[in-house]
Amino acid sequence: MTKIVILTGAGISAESGLGTFRDTGGIWSQYDLTEVATPEGFARNPALVHAFYNARRKNAAEAIPNAAHAALARLEQALPGDVLIVTQNIDDLHERAGSRNVLHMHGAITRAKCAACAHEWDAPMEMRADDPCPACKAPATRPDIVWFGEFPYHMEAIWDALRAADLFVSIGTSGSVYPAAAFVQDAGRAGARTLELNLDPSENIHDFDEARQGPASVLVPAWVDEMLGR
Ligand code: OAD
């Protein structure tokens, strides 16, 4: 029995048509992250932040899972209970491909949250700054996204899983945002073998035991076939 923790980033959804953040022409070259992905930016201009995430929500809803998402779902089905996906992505392509054991450490574009009372619910396709919270009625609704300066979700469960992992695989992430960028070291220290599957070498490629370069739609199905002995 091999316990596998898989970290995914924007690169796994790139071939589904969702833009990455830091590649040439990426989201952070088109938008100022301090304006659209921080609590301070939201306080200054909630309409701008909602417009940004409304566009992300529409793109994500229109996207379809690619061969890499499907391969990870196949791995989980073949090894039930032994595969955990920790994703930095806010899209739901892992779930729509069939993965069930998924932790969204940076939140989910399909969910809304009240900044006043912390109530959470399914986000409508278009959110507006003056939408009232369904629970407390405060006009303080925000996307349920973890912004820069906020603490990621599920961290205790993630660190527990990294400590228990035999294999840690990082897919489609530049390794530039913490704490996710340190997971390879956390898992390695706990004795896991570590593997990177990414289009370009990541910032922390030297922390991995092995790294393979190429598109996720090719590398991930091939790696899953290896894992399943096919
Ligand atoms: P980045 O945009 O930083 O990195 C994407 C990585 O995916 C790059 O290293 C690319 O080489 C790789 N890549 C691109 N296309 C690929 C493909 N077809 N197959 C495989 N790899 C590919 O995105 P993340 O690392 O996910 O956080 O960014 C981490 C966090 O920074 C995000 O969750 C987001 C962002 O700011 C928040 O907004 C809180």
Image (spheres, rainbow, N blue to C red):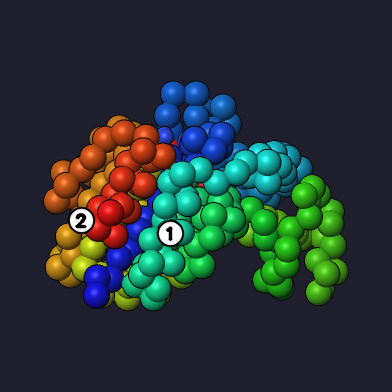
How far across and how far down the image is residue 36, in percent? 61, 41
Looking at the rendering, in which quadrant would you find the C terminus? Answer: bottom left
Residue 150, above or below 53 = below
Residue at 59% x, 56% y is 96
How far across and how far down the image is residue 53, in percent? 67, 44
Q: Secondary structure at mark 2?
A: strand
Residue 29, above or below 111 = above
- The amino acid pointed to by label 1 is Arg
The 10 Å Cα crowd at callout 1, few under 14, some 14 to 19, many 20 or more, is: some
How far across and how far down the image is residue 93, in percent? 56, 51
Residue at 67% x, 60% y is 111
Task: Identify which residue, 106 or 209, lies in the foreground.
Answer: 209
CA–CA distance in space, label 2 to label 1: 20 Å
Residue 34 falls in image quadrant: top right
| Disc assigned to residue 221 | none
Is residue 143 visible to us here?
yes
| Disc assigned to residue 194 | 2
- The amino acid pointed to by label 2 is Thr
Residue 224, above or below 204 = below
Is residue 174 visible to us here?
no
Residue at 68% x, 46% y is 61
Which residue was labeled with disc 1? 74
Residue at 81% x, 74% y is 135
Displayed-image quarter of ligand 1: top left
Looking at the rendering, in which quadrant would you find the N terminus? Answer: bottom left
